[in-house]
Amino acid sequence: MFRQVKSVALLLVAAAACGCNSGSQPSPPEESSNHTPVTGSADDVIQDFSEFYHNAGSFRVNSQVRAELQISFGDLPPGYEPMEFSREFLIAAPDRLAFKDDEGAVIRSDGEHLYAVTPDGKRYWRGEAPRQIAALLDHQISNLFRGPGMMRPLILAGDEPVDALDSQVGDLEYVDKEQIDGVSAHHLRVTPADSEGESNTGVEQIDVWIAAEGDPVLLRHRFENSPKRTQVGPNEFINASMIITETFSEWEFDPADVDEAVAFVPDDDALRFAGLGGAFGETNPMVGKPAPKTVLEVVDGETRTLADHEGDIVILDFWATWCGPCREELPLLARLADEFQNDGVVLYAVNQQEDVEDIQQFLTQENLDITATLDPKGEIARDYGVGGIPHVAIVGRNGVIQAVHVGVNRDLSETEREFREELQALISGRNIAKEGLPH
């Protein structure tokens, strides 16, 4: 029992680096509820809460978030930066979701595909739907929820608590029975633990309020951390602390419009992007421009130019042997270039300011049979607007830069999917810089 209780407690506070408060009032429990309230211990409350949400097939909930960031700099008095926003979730276990917030972010999962859509509906990303909605905690899309800590309702849709996370809960305490905007609530407090199983002193406390009457719905969650010292310049530091409270309201179970709510049909003129960064970030200024005419010096002494590959699709990967993400991505690109070689796909690994001997030694050690080229002064990188590595530019058959990728997704399989979709579209003759990917 204690193992399960600790797991559920963790799920309530998982990724608590971002949580929420509001003046919004939670909906009072339905008088007709047949649920038998529990009393007394944290274990009983959590067990009741867990069983209730495990048996809830689908639900809709609104939330109001208040984040309070306190910053102090040197001898100056502390400053406060409050942020407030509202959100709406509709979740149908195990794999369907509709989400939106008041800034317009829209996320849908219809059980087959996962979509993220810009506020104007003109740009979107599509990926594979998760088997469990709670799996989105570890997905790159969590950034659109403003961080994993802002994904509490998704955790409630999980099939079972995650046993592997048990050790991360230090202490679970029943504080008191209190009133939250006129609703009786169990107030629980969780102290996270560090890797040694001791309390994590960076987090002062995490508080959760669960309805004590009617259905045991989540009413409020509050996260508070202790000040963190961060260097912002030479001999310059700031201290920052955060208090985030989220108040949930208008819980609706088994809503009738699930199928309609989770569906997404793009407009004909909407552009689909392979990566979330392409859909939601600013378009790289090099995309859509003719590729700079540069001479590529191969490590074996030969020289190449893009003119040598007129009609081909050229991948330029700017990298270095010391760059960990580069070392992860380069074999992936090598495999894709080999797979699509007969379709006119060519890879050049443009090394940044390293010796030929170091490059060749690395390629031999990693058993990489690729064409590596030199950029000893970083001039080619500057021509292509490279600010950091890995940086990948894909040049289409028309000599125009069709896509740019900076950095590596923490999920390499997702990175591979993005590159594969773009290459397949280019091979088919699509101008993805202008038209996006096929719907």
Image (cartoon, rainbow, N blue to C red):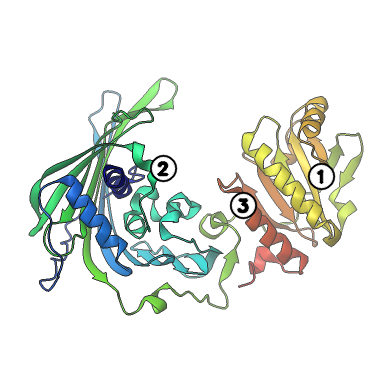
Query: Looking at the image, is mark 1 or mark 3 earlier in the sequence?
Result: 1
Q: Amino acid at mark 3?
A: Ser
In the rendered image, the residue lying farthest to the front is: 1
Pick the quarter of the image with the C terminus: bottom right
Q: Which of pointers 1 and 2 indicates the residue nearer the eye?
A: 2
Determine whether 238 is above or below 416 in the image. Answer: above
Q: Quadrant of residue 289?
A: bottom right
Q: Which mark is residue 164?
A: 2
Q: Mark 1 to mark 3: distance in Å?
A: 31 Å
Residue for point 59% across, 54% down: 414
Q: Secondary structure at mark 1?
A: loop
Determine whether 235 is above or below 307 in the image. Answer: above
Q: Residues within 10 Å of mark 1 (few under 14, many from 20)?
A: some
- Are the residues tagged 1 and 3 within 8 Å (C-beta)? no
Q: Amino acid at mark 1?
A: Thr
Query: Looking at the image, is mark 1 or mark 2 earlier in the sequence?
Result: 2
Which x, y percent locates residue 437? Answer: 64, 67
Q: Residues within 10 Å of mark 3 (few under 14, many from 20)?
A: few
Q: Which residue is mark 1?
A: 294
Q: Residues within 10 Å of mark 2 (few under 14, many from 20)?
A: few
Q: Nearer the viewer, residue 172 or 424?
A: 172
The reply to whether residue 85 is visible in this rendering is yes
Which x, y percent locates residue 33? Answer: 14, 70
Q: Amino acid at mark 2?
A: Ala
Q: Which residue is mark 3?
A: 413
Query: Looking at the image, is mark 2 or mark 3 earlier in the sequence?
Result: 2
Which x, y percent locates residue 75? Answer: 26, 23
The reply to whether residue 286 is visible in this rendering is no
Which x, y percent locates residue 305? Answer: 86, 47
Q: Secondary structure at mark 2?
A: helix
